[in-house]
Image (tube, helix red, strand yellow):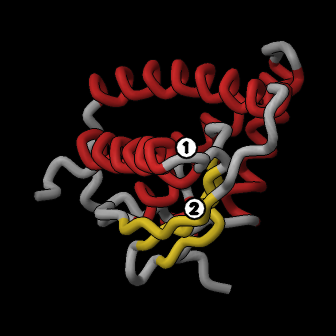
């Protein structure tokens, strides 16, 4: 049995994260919970190895990330209210649309993060990702008018621009 891969599997910060999450799941920080978290983290790191994250070319702009997260949370509240109103309003169900949009994100990890952030917002869902061509197929809930459709497309463009500004600063 070769142990050369053990050196590459050992990720101390990942183990610390698992220990912290273990203590949070247990509800208190005790010696027993810390030891249990350490045992769980050792098992996860060595018995269930994860591939390294594809983070080459990513440099995080922390200030822009903080501003983005605040804006994203505000937009989450607005979208929740909007979708809630669409559900209870005394009008007929709005027209929906399926659109294909190109994305300029170079890093697959950043693309996956952008898709996850978009899917967490009510009102639209990414139903397909064409990685090779960097195309998203998005189902939009409210496409009653051309203005609504353009607003949703602009929101995807803004998300793309924000992800580039935060994570891909070397992007042209």
Choose between 42 and 73: the one closer to the eye. 73
Furthest-front residue in this view? 91
Q: Is residue 49 above or below residue 37?
A: below
Total tally of numbered discs in the picture: 2
Q: Quadrant of residue 126?
A: bottom right
Question: Where residue 133 sits: x, y (%)?
Answer: 38, 81
- The residue pinned by badge 1 equals 117
Query: Which label is found at residue 137?
Result: none
Classify 10 Å Cα crowding around label 1: few (below 14), some (14-19), many (20 and above): few
Question: Where residue 102 sits: x, y (%)?
Answer: 37, 68
Which mark sits nearer the N-terminus, 1 or 2? 1
User: Residue at position x 37%, y 45% from top?
Assistant: 154
Give the side of residue 134 with respect to residue 142, left or right. Answer: left
The quarter in which the N terminus is drawn is bottom right
Callout 2 secondary element: strand
User: Residue at position x 18%, y 47% from top?
Assistant: 169
Q: Tell us which disc is closer to us: 1 or 2.
A: 2
Callout 1 secondary element: helix
User: Residue at position x 59%, y 76% from top?
Assistant: 3
Choose between 131 and 42: the one closer to the eye. 131
User: Residue at position x 55%, y 56% from top?
Assistant: 10
Classify 10 Å Cα crowding around label 2: few (below 14), some (14-19), many (20 and above): many
- The residue pinned by badge 2 equals 138
The quarter in which the C terminus is drawn is bottom left
């Amino acid at each position: 049995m070769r142990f050369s891969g053990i050196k590459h599997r050992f990720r101390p910060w990942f183990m610390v994260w698992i220990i912290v999450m273990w203590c949070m799941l247990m509800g208190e920080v005790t010696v027993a919970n810390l030891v249990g978290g350490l045992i769980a983290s050792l098992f996860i790191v060595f018995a269930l190895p994860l591939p390294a994250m594809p983070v080459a070319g990513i440099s995080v702009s922390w200030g822009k990330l903080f501003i983005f997260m605040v804006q994203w949370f505000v937009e989450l509240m607005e979208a929740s209210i909007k979708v809630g109103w669409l559900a209870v309003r005394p009008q007929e169900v709005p027209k929906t649309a399926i659109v294909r949009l190109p994305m300029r994100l170079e890093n697959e990890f950043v693309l996956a993060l952008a898709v996850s952030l978009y899917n967490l917002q009510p009102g639209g869902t990414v139903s397909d990702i064409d990685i090779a061509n960097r195309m998203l197929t998005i189902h939009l809930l409210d496409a009653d008018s051309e203005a609504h459709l353009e607003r949703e497309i602009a929101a995807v463009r803004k998300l793309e621009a924000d992800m580039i500004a935060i994570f891909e600063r070397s992007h042209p």
